[in-house]
Image (cartoon, rainbow, N blue to C red):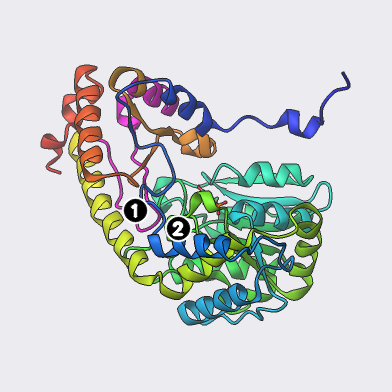
Amino acid sequence: MPELSNIVESLAPSGIRRFFDIAATMKDIVSLGVGEPDFVTPWAFREAAIYSIERGQTQYTSNYGLLELRELISNHISSFYGVKYDFKNEILVTVGVSEGMDLAMRVLLNPGDEVILPLPCYVSYQPCVILAGGVVVGIETTAETHFVPTVEQLEAAVTPRTKAIMFGYPSNPTGGTLTREQAQDIVNFAIKHDLYIISDEIYDRLTYEGQHVCIPSLPGAKERTILLNGFSKAYAMTGWRLGYACAPEEILSAMVKIHAYTIMSLPIPTQRAAIQALTTGEPAVKDMVSHYNRRRRLIVAGLNEIGLECHLPNGAFYAFPSIKVTGLTSEEFAERLLFEEQVAVVPGTAFGSSGEGHVRCSYATSIDKIELAITRIDRFVKKNALIPPSLQPSKLNL
Ligand code: PLP
């Protein structure tokens, strides 16, 4: 048979999948691996979809999505962040943020154009750049700067081929958020070098302290930014595949061109569920966020007590402890923990090489499971004497 696409063949399979596949074959697993809410979509949203099917709403919609939904999205962004998008021309309903990031790359990039990505980052950013013919320029951020790139790092990464910078805060995998100043620094950098910004804000509502900084709300940002968001995380709607992209009309209409040829439109029942979510979903979101917040404190305290240093993440539902003290690589730690104690975590390197020395622990799971996972991780490090006595927490007075 003729060979497959060279670009596709060059892509490494997702490091997260490999762990899920192994975990799926094991019994008695406690999974801190999965990046999705453990809550079922609130009943009112599901009911809206069921009712829509009952009414026979089985047709295509506008390529952009239902007008009513786009208007609600526009009002939502305006009321939370004060950013105004024209719902007729600047908002597209997408198949999750996943489609949004693919469209963004495909409309912005010509072959060989460079995209700056602060690492570690969500597993799909790099493949989306590569699949669109672009070149990834990774910035290795570190725990010392809470995995936020410094202006010096940004300046060192820019070349005449740089077209865009893409990032997502609150961050998957680190849980880190941006301060207003840090966000403005990145925006100013983009303005200075005339770059597009792709801002994945899928975890915006999962910000625990302070206000989420919506990138296009910053001075000078909106006209060069593609804002991506969706319903998967805050509304517990991962399987519905529902997101949206907001951008200036010229960019958005280019995205719609691709979307119209490849997707056409999202199912009406799905869009009706989103309408319900934006109309009456706020108490459910607040309730889920308060659960995540409790779990966040529990897991971070537990990891630190074991001796695995972990900052309190301000967003998303991930803790990103350092496992450097054990002397194991992230892969070794995750693999041995899985086989010896049946706890699934994701090696930090699945999100880029600067994730080495860390593992991602999702706390989108019950308090009981988090407690059990902590007990098992503790047993794992003690049994294997992975933490030198001089670095054990009682000695450090943690
Ligand atoms: N962006 C980030 C940072 C994510 O963590 C995820 C899912 O884990 C996605 C995008 C994909 O979102 P969606 O379900 O809207 O496609």
Within 10 Å of disc 2 (Cα), the crowding (few <14, some 14-19, many 20+) is many
Tell me the quarter of the picture where residue 212 sits: bottom left
Q: Are marks 1 and 2 in contact (CB under 8 Å)?
A: yes
Question: In terms of depth relative to the viewer, which is nearer, 250 or 118?
Answer: 250
Q: Position of residue 11 (x, y in %)?
A: 69, 32
Q: Is residue 348 above or below residue 29?
A: below
Q: Position of residue 16 (x, y in %)?
A: 50, 33
The residue positioned 17% from the left and 39% from the top of the image is 305
Callout 2, which amino acid?
Pro
Q: Which residue is mark 1?
A: 313
Give yes or no for residue 329 being in the magenta stretch.
yes
Callout 1, which amino acid?
Pro
Q: Which mark is residue 170?
A: 2
Within 10 Å of disc 1 (Cα), the crowding (few <14, some 14-19, many 20+) is many
Q: Quadrant of the N terminus?
A: top right
Q: Which residues are magenta?
A: 308-337
Q: Which mark is residue 256?
A: none
Residue 382 appears in view = yes
Dot 2: element = loop
Answer with left or right where residue 338 lies relative to residue 355.
left
